[in-house]
Image (spheres, rainbow, N blue to C red):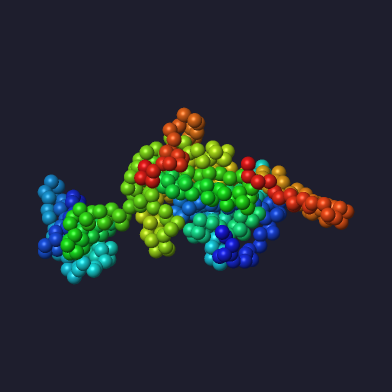
Amino acid sequence: MAGDRAKPCELDQEKYDADDNVKIICLGDSAVGKSKLMERFLMDGFQPRQLSTHALTLYKHTATVDGKTVLVDFWDTAGQERFQSMHASYYHKAHACIMVFDVQRKITYKNLSTWYTELREFRPEIPCIVVANKIDDRPMSYLLSTADIKMTQKSFSFARKFSLPLYFVSAADGTNVVKLFSDAIRLAVSYKQNSRDFMDEVLQELESISLEQKEEDMLGKEQRGRVESPSPS
Amino acid sequence: MMCTAKKCGIRFQPPAVILIYENEMKGKSRQRIMPVRNFSKYSDCSRAAEQLKNNPRHKGYLEQVSLKQLEKLFSFLRGYLWGQSLAETMEQIQRETTIDPEEDLNKLDDKELAKRKSIMDELFEKNQKKKDDPNFVYDIEVEFPQDEQLQSCGWDTESADESS
């Protein structure tokens, strides 16, 4: 999967361990409007940093959550999504995920499951919001069929299946865009505060130490596998 | 010059863009024939449209006619020069200016993807509420009911045929 075209990521991701830093990633097919959503949320404040060597666009934002300043890095895909897979470093240390599909294009909805599977492979626990974009009221005259069905009156079972929140938004008229990002930041911060990432690492450390000891103590007995982080529920 | 455009069309033989408009004399329609020169079946329609729109002799009359419309008229002419039927040309224009919702855009190359994106961008800009619009609101929250009673989007069934 992501391995072959992997480029080493020199981007400093250590900072995401700091208390006031969170990393939020965007996922979804080409042309579902990920960047448009970012731009609508950040308005004039956006100065994307194109990191072409990493095929990603970085948007910086400062938010206030419960009176505390939070430095948010939004990661956007910059074309890498065409491979229907992202490099591992894209997921590394992410605290929340915004997963977008185009409510006018079925295939982008169908592909959510691919994106979700990959996300959970790397980040089994982080909060994830499903976003139905392009709900603009005006009929989608550029489409050949299913012109002006009110998609907001329909149910999308993908989100329910995985108990994920679903937001209907429009980057064009702004519907629910600010709410989406504010909630995503909030979720990222609370995930970070309550995260078991650190505990997991410690537990794994302890486990491997005790395994080594056991190995010494009871040679010949069957060795237990290392405890991995919990798999998606 | 006061000029209200009413209709704009294309004549194939001899090729000309024809505008029906009204000037100061309200109620009286006038016709302006703008000959199309140096246009072959290999010509670029958007460039031809731009040239006509910026032609000093026609500029004033074409103010209200969009570049898109002129471009489309030139596409008809081009199709005619290729010997296509009107229906064929219409279909071709449709293909080039619309997004097929079933198409997997992940599978396109950069150029084709950029084309689709520019079609989408055009619609986006039409629907976009910009910051300098007088009734612009930054934070718009709309609640959509999400319960079991909603009609299914029809995209969830595994066996759903691709054309639905």
**Residue A166 as seen in the image, left or right of residue B101:** right
- Residue A175, x across and y down, in percent: 47, 42
- In this view, the residue in front, A100 or B104, is B104
**Residue B8 visible, this orientation:** yes
Query: The N terminus of chain A lies in which quarter of the figure?
Result: bottom right
Please name the residue shown 56% across and 48% down the image.
Answer: A116
- Residue B23, x across and y down, in percent: 16, 52
**Residue A71 visible, this orientation:** no
- In this view, the residue in front, A166 or B127, is A166
- In this view, the residue in front, A95 or B105, is B105
Could you say which quadrant of the image residue B71 lies in? bottom left
Relative to B75, does residue A179 appear above or below in the rendering?
A: above
Please name the residue shown 66% across and 62% down the image.
Answer: A12
Please name the residue shown 11% across and 49% down the image.
Answer: B28
**Residue B151 as seen in the image, left or right of residue B86:** right
- Residue B163, x across and y down, in percent: 36, 45
**Residue A132 as seen in the image, left or right of residue A184:** left
Q: Residue furthest bottom?
A: B38
Badge count: 0
Q: Residue furthest right?
A: A217
**Residue A9 as seen in the image, left or right of residue B3:** right
Relative to B92, does residue B148 appear above or below in the rendering?
A: above
Query: The C terminus of chain A lies in which quarter of the figure?
Result: top right
- Residue B76, x across and y down, in percent: 20, 58
